[in-house]
Amino acid sequence: MPSACPGAMVHAFLIHNLRAPQAQDTGLCRVLYSCVFGAENSPDDPRPHGAERDRLLRKEQILAVARQVESMCQLQQQASGRTSVDLQLQSSDEPVPLHEAPHGAFRLAAGDPFQEPRTVVWLGVLSLGFVLVLDAHENLLLAESTLRLLARLLLDHLRLLTPSTNLLLRADRIEGILARFLPHGQLLFLNDQFVQGLEKELSASWPR
Amino acid sequence: MFTAGAESLLHQARDIRDEELKKFCSRVVNLLQKDELGPDAVDALQRLFLIVSATKYKRKLEDTCVHLLQATLCSPKCPEQLQLLCASILRETSPRDDLTLSCDHIQSTRQLSLVASVLLAQGDPKGEVRSVGQRVFRILESRQPEGPSPRHLLPVVSKITHLAPHTLHEDQTNQLSKRLVDWLRYASVQQGVAHTSGGFFSTPRARQPGPVTEVDGAVATDFFTVLSTGQHFTEDQWLNVQAFSMLRAWLLHSDPEGPSAPDADDRSELEGSTLSVLSAGSTAGRLLPPRERLREKAFEYCQRLAEQSTRRALRKGDSDLQKACLVEAVLVLDVLCRQDPSFLYRTLSCLKALHARLCGDPARVRTLLPIAQFFLNHGEAAAVDSEAVLRHLLTRTPSEFFHSPMLAFELTCFCRDNLPLFGRNLDILKRSFPNLFKLLAWNSPPLTAEFVALLPSLVDADTAVEVLHALLDLPCLTAALDLQLRLSPATSERPLWDPSLKIPSCLEASRDPQFQGLLQYLLRATASGTTERLGPLHRLLQPLASCARVVQCAQAVPTLLEAFFSAVTQFADGALTKQLALLLLERSDSLFQVPQYEAHVHRVLSSRFLALCALHPSLVVELAKELLEFVGSVSGIQGRGAMLASVVRPASLPAPPLPRRAARRGLRSVPTQVWAIGEYLSVSWDRRCTVEQINRFFEALEAVLFEVTQSRPSAALPRCPPQVVTVLMTTLTKLASRSQDLIPRYGRGRTGKPAGFPWVREWAPDACPVPDVRSAGGRLLASPPRFSSSSPTSWGPRSTCGARLQRTRVPSSSGSLCSCRR
């Protein structure tokens, strides 16, 4: 029952690549950026953990999520008859219609891969997947609009659509965006003016 | 975009060797030791982040480097960009045991928040969570008007209470509750002035800031909320946003026990009722303890949000926020009513009005879910029947919005999570299964697991047969929904179906009244209690069978069937089992023709048929007529042959419970109908079994054996799998052992004299142990064997005993036959 869940926050945010369904043999599913908000193991967990093992587990969990998102996205794209062409080729100058981008949600049962049950909300934009891993009973409408907002900000501020810029070497900007719009994994009820205020602050810290 | 360049960069980062990394670290150390940290340092740290984050294995960073990263993070004059990078590198390499980081002397709240993010990523081996919590609270308590803003600290508090709920003391919790009340309810209603600190060009303006406005542009009529807007915001307005964002989690944290907390109930009920009369309640409210006062203010806030969400937002973002706020408001009200039932009556009237308003608003359909949740949680306490709310949600919403992936997901989770709460309304849920299946049929990849969990609650003795038909027709339902969308006026700019698939003939033919009726039946909203033969519809929708969505759905059906049978065998009595077994036989050749679908479904159906027989062994005798017809109708091994004797079970599917005797013999997989006949067509399972029945089955199966081994219309068709032949032979010998008329035939095979089925050897010389006696085969074919059925009921004690004796020899033969295929 939902009331049993003590809190409601975002556990992790990640960006990964989305391969076209036919191109599975070209490259692998790669996590390009991930941020886990706080460690999952509870303080009263008695088992002894090697720090290394904890980190390995965390990375494996994130990759497991990325793989599942990739296959969900591919299945959805196939089902709606959209081929890889829609995913890959788009003029980088046009604004991406995020409201029409493939998106969805699914659940992860407790223990697979996280200790707690989680909900995954994802958004596929061209060849990138943006993902929030949520506590099971988070406000999904808010999570969904936050994810769209984050994707839009990342695309704008990192100019992700131009082939030359490399998201891999822009961790500071991604972190700057997350620190403002998803601080410590807290989903925020930001109206349009608040978003603009934070964006101005962001632009001031990172002159383009 | 993810390009080849990015891929190669990732590879480089992964392939860096320890010595190279060591060199790179000393470069970073040099850069960080400079007085002026420039773009070089930023670039180096960006690369270091990539190196540590690109691999899942540990990267050893030099001690001096780790030390300098911490020092830079905590340095007051370090630019934000570098602080963020230092924090992210330290977090990425967490948990680490060489951290000396502490947040005790950090003044900037933004910096403190970053340091906290590193400390909280350690997993709390040294009590990091508590120490961060205490430091954050000291700052929150200080309340200096010119001091650091708590705005950046509230998310830290949220995270801490989430990670370790008992970190804060009672008085700290009360303290924060008090401040949350101020931020929530008493934020300024004047707009902020243009901010000077962040902007480069901004200069203080002389213009007087106006009042905050509503999302529709009107001047705000009441206190500030997250749906109030303006050009600029004051600090307490920012805190208002933070406070509401963490409100629900905080309410749950500050009173996890709910209404059982001592004396909270009576007092707040008293105060609550006073307040509801006074409505504004500022003087009465002051008397309440912090926790109750926060609840009171939270209630007012939610009511204000409900009112504000009726306004027509000027911006798309605000309109989305209105929906999210409505959901949150209802969730908060739910928490309030659980913690303090005195809120119930005030909340109910508000929610009833809200529900009435939202029912007709398709854009806000998802906000109906938390309202239904509320009525499920509190309907009983408030003596309000949640039936109407649920009925609306389950009968209308899925039909109209099955194509929305988020709604489908939320509604399915809603049903699954609330199963214990449905109570006497469970019947509404059960009867809505055709509607819920639409969500599944359209969105099978993310929802299959949810439905596997949900199915046991949807199935009972009344619905089982209809549910099974619906599951078998699920891919057909997907195709029908596709057709329905194509026929209905466009709802979005992009089509929801696969536009590359053109189906003019389908669209044309679907207007035929004959199909209309069947389509309506398939697309029904609730259980009808009847079953229709959908054969004509299968043919109509055939052009859609190859579309990816239908294929995906078809792939999910075997898993769902397994879940269905696991559930149904828990309660099925003899009559229902017989009905289901009949249905299996009947439906095995009337499935929607999706590639691979029939074969996969046959595997499940056949294994489940055997499981049903194991539960009710007399099934074979009771269904003798139908089974004989079924066996007689098998033509070749291509069609129902797979169903008749499917041996290879996919490893991913759980094996059905084998009959104990079969398991004892070590038979892991068995051809089923035939196996079932051999296993259960015996007087020892059912006294009604007659020798005539046994003889007729023998004849029928012998004919099948002949057909599958001898007739192969074209070389292109695959040969009959040896397992099928094996099982047929085993079954025939078993049957033979139970009928005195048949024993001589069986005996000939065993003693090396003319065997019953020599043509089998011709079919597969290596697999067959019997000698090749062509003349016997010729004779057998020339004149089909005749069995005397003189005394159908003459199974006396002696003959039963004889049959048992015979049967003891069968296992060895069946065992060796089965093992020869491995």
Image (spheres, coloured by chain):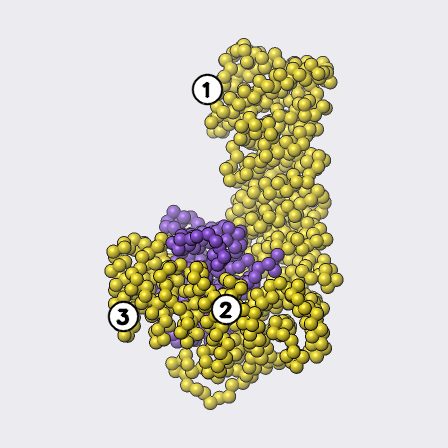
Using the image, determine if residue B72 lies above or below residue B470: below
Q: Amino acid at mark 1?
A: Asp
**Mark linked to residue B157:** 2
Q: Spatial distance from mark 1 to mark 2, Cα to Cα? A: 75 Å
Q: Colour of chain B?
A: yellow
The chain letter for the residue carrying disc 2 is: B
Mark 2 and mark 1 in contact (Cβ < 8 Å)? no
Foreground mark, 3 or 1, reads 3
Residue at the spot of label 3: B33
Q: Are marks 3 and 1 on the same chain?
A: yes
Please give the name of the residue rendered at 55% of the width and 58% of the height, measured from the top-left corner.
Answer: A136
> SS of the residue at dot 1?
loop
Q: Position of residue B63 (x, y in %)?
A: 30, 62
Q: Position of residue B361 (x, y in %)?
A: 64, 65
Q: Is residue A95 left or right of residue B406?
A: left
Q: Colour of chain A?
A: purple
Q: Quadrant of the N terminus of chain A?
A: bottom right
Please give the name of the residue rendered at 67% of the width and 32% of the height, measured from the top-left corner.
Answer: B616
Q: Spatial distance from mark 3 to mark 2, Cα to Cα? A: 33 Å
The chain letter for the residue carrying disc 3 is: B
Q: Image quarter for residue B65?
A: bottom left
Compare marks 3 and 2 and give the one earlier in the sequence.
3
Mark 1 and mark 3 in contact (Cβ < 8 Å)? no
Q: Amino acid at mark 3?
A: Gln
**Mark linked to residue B766:** 1
